[in-house]
Amino acid sequence: MTEPANRAAETLSFGPFTVTPHERLVMRDGVALPLGGRTFDTLIALMSRPNEVVSKWELIASVWPGMTVEEANLRFHVAALRKALGDGKGEARYITTLSGRGYCFVAPITRASLAAKRRPEPQMELPPVKLPNRLQRMVGRADTISAVAEKLMASRFVTIVGPGGVGKTAVAVTIAHDLLETFADAAHFVDLAALSDPDLVITSIMLMLGLPAQADDPMPALLAHLRDERMLLILDNCEHVISAAAPLAAEIFQAAPHVHILATSREALRVEGEQVHRLAPLAVPPDGPGLTAAVAWTYPALQLFLERATAGGAQLALDDSNAAIVAGICRKLDGMALAIELAAGRVEAYGLVQTAALLDERLSLLWQGQRTAPPRQQTLQATLDWSYGLLSDLERLVLRRLAVFAGHFTIDAALEVVPDDRVDRSVLFDAIDSLVAKSMVAPRPIGAMMRYRLLDTTRAYLLKIEADGAALAARHASYYRRWLDQAGTTWAAVPSADERAVHFSALHNVRAALDWCFNGGDVGIGIALAAAAAPIFLAMSLLVECRRWSERALRAIEPQARGSAEEMHLQAALGLTLMFTRGGSDAARGALSRSLEIATARGDTMNQLQLLGRMHIFHERMGQFEAALGYAQQSLAVSGALGDAASIALAHSLAGVSLHLAGKHRDALKMLEIAWQGPGTDRISTVYGFDHRNRAGITLARELWLQGRPADALQLAQQTVSEAAQMDHPITLCIALIWAVSIALWSGDLDGAEADIDRFIAHAESRSMGPYLAVGRGVKGELAILRGDARSGVETIKGCLEELHDAGYELLTTTFNLALVQGLLALGRFEQAMRLIDEAIALVERCGDHLYMPELLRVKGKVLLSQPQPNRDQAQVEFMQSLELSRRESARAWELRTAIDLAELLAGQQRRNDAKQLLQSAVEGFAEGSDTADIRTASRLLGTL
């Protein structure tokens, strides 16, 4: 847009704002506002005619000269301008709208020359942690950024397409920062450059979003998480994984209507919904005589070259004598931003003329006669070839060796991997510093440590050059094996994007090392590396990937290495991942059993305890409760030998849960109290998949309810759910929620149970927890039955049980069988109800979850009474057996329920006094002030007696 005549050197002020038109800069109290190009032009057009009505069409003609633009575009930029200025907040009034006429700038404007008024230095604001830092100044891209941002807001899906090195990522990052406020800081940058496997694209996105990718098909979980989210998702460097990135972006676009996708790629994704913006190279002057500095400075390619050369230490000022030389360099580099930056970085060392001469010598053969024909990659290839040739022999050698790293690496990693008899450790620091200065290695501070990375194009170029091959790759794999050994299982839920970036970089290098080891490299190192990586894959919930590498490593173990620590860890990882991804398979059982056998034979008590815990979990999920109790009891003996408080607390947690499920309430209460009062965990357990203390707490809450202390139970349940939520660990929270739901249902709080189960389902759905989703639907069916919709509830629970049986998940089978019997009774299906209750009782006697036996006997009595020809005598026998079991283990809550049903039966037999004494005795066992649905029912019944 053309500025008002004779005012290019002025500043304009209104309110707290200062506008410098010739710099296209708006500042508020010294802080630069991130206005897009068209938004800035809109402001200048209005300020050029203060207190006048500027029609919409006049504004459009001024801001988009020579273009046909919809009025909606103008409204968008006026709204963006008002938002940036805070117009309408408090007493701030800058722009008014006159309906049907246009807009008017109403604030008083003060003009001052730059000489008379010094502009304060801009203050840089820290970028959000989920995005890379933006450039302090983008050269030649203001209109592009504004146009792409406008298209992105209107269409939701834009791909910036262009050749490598043209600046696609820089433009995308700048747009993301400009739109941060629009998306309330919900902008996620996913760098796909380090991936070599398209199957890891969705995994990278899920981990950056803080979601564990633990399912064979994580797509439903990702879409469920994004469905109602409003965010900006940036997918950077899609071209080499386009087969996965393109359909994934299309799925997200269709399923998540509030997610805006900004992709960068060397080619269009070519999927429905995508709007393509082709990013052209920076403009360069035409080849011809008489180029002056004033004209040359108007071309962004030359601006970028001069800025980067000066930043690199060169004493360079553009004048009429060197304008043609700089223009020639930029033309030879075809306006490619990366190539220009590489060339500009050499000016300080070689001077402008020599830089141009070297450029001619190295690139003339490659470009001669092919200016329009070759693909852009050839231009960048030539630039990299030239830059590589300017390095010293030592720098070239170090750079080639650094290409072994996939993604970021630390100086410590470089010191362990790069040196040998040809590269001394003492010179490595200087070599890397020099490579950073020459733009061949990119530094980035992450946390408290500087990390380094080769640009993906640079690394691809170097990998084509003959390097040190096997020896270098072996050092790289061995380093990450040692690093993983030191990291151990301390990798837990990663709280911030920067910390996730560190972990992702390490995973990229581990994957690259594993690929080399098992594809013609050193298999021995690969086995050790896979064993060391297993806990990290488990901590990051990468179960499928952990299973794949564990299986591959186990196949490669030589017979003489059987029984080693590596086999023990690999079998343990394989068993756990098979259990979670494929259910209770024989293969999972075999792997866990083999691992425990090795740990026992080696006398490794710590791993023995861990593996007893895994065997306990396996059999508990399978519904083999007596076997699970056996493993829990073994863990008590092993933890006693270890003697540390954490091991003892963990074993008591396992034993307490098993005793609770076995209906041994007195013993369970003691065990759970020890576990709950034991030491807390500083991290989420990567061995068991959940926090054992939290699970002990929610189980203890259930025990308190059964013991007749419902208020204490509710308080502890709320505490454990709150603590689990703060841990931000999916399995721990789901365990706490589902058992808190059971307490709410037992208490008759249907609304509270529904709120918790909705939260449970949403959490499980977003994290691909298939069995837990079936559990959630089953509870929904139970709620439907309790609210009178028996038909729907019965069908829902039947479907839930089928899914859980298929997954080998039998932990809650008895719970849902009880609910199903209640539903069948409500539908009048008495024979089905009797058959099912007998089957449920037989199943409990066979498997050992005697927790519900008093309830099963009570419900059987109700089924007998509900028959067309009630069997009152047999019903009374069932009720008496239920009472005896409840009293034996002090399960007062079960005792009260049975007492209510038996009292009603006795009252019908004119034994009102016996009924009254029975009920009073049951109620007296509860803590004072207890209030549950059963207590209220008993009180009403006592009133009638």
Image (tube, rainbow, N blue to C red):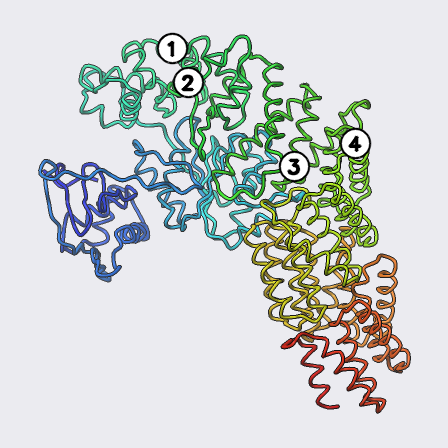
Between discs 3 and 1, the one toward the N terminus? 1
- Mark 4, secondary structure of its residue: helix
Mark 2 Cα shell of 10 Å, populated few (<14), some (14-19), many (≥20) = some
Q: CA distance from mark 2 to mark 1?
A: 25 Å
Q: Which mark is residue 435?
A: 2
Q: Residue at x 31, y 34 (%)?
A: 136
Between discs 3 and 2, the one toward the N terminus? 2
Residue at mark 1: 364
Q: CA distance from mark 3 to mark 2?
A: 35 Å
Image quadrant where one finds the C terminus: bottom right
Residue at mark 4: 602
Of residues 708 and 511, the one drawn nearer to the viewer in this rendering? 708
Kindly identify the amino acid type of the residue bearing the numbered disc 4.
Arg
Between discs 4 and 2, the one toward the N terminus? 2
Q: Are the residues at dot 3 and dot 2 in contact (C-beta closer than 8 Å)?
A: no
Kindly identify the amino acid type of the residue bearing the numbered disc 1.
Ser
Of discs 4 and 2, which sits in the foreground?
4
Of residues 253 and 856, the one drawn nearer to the viewer in this rendering? 856
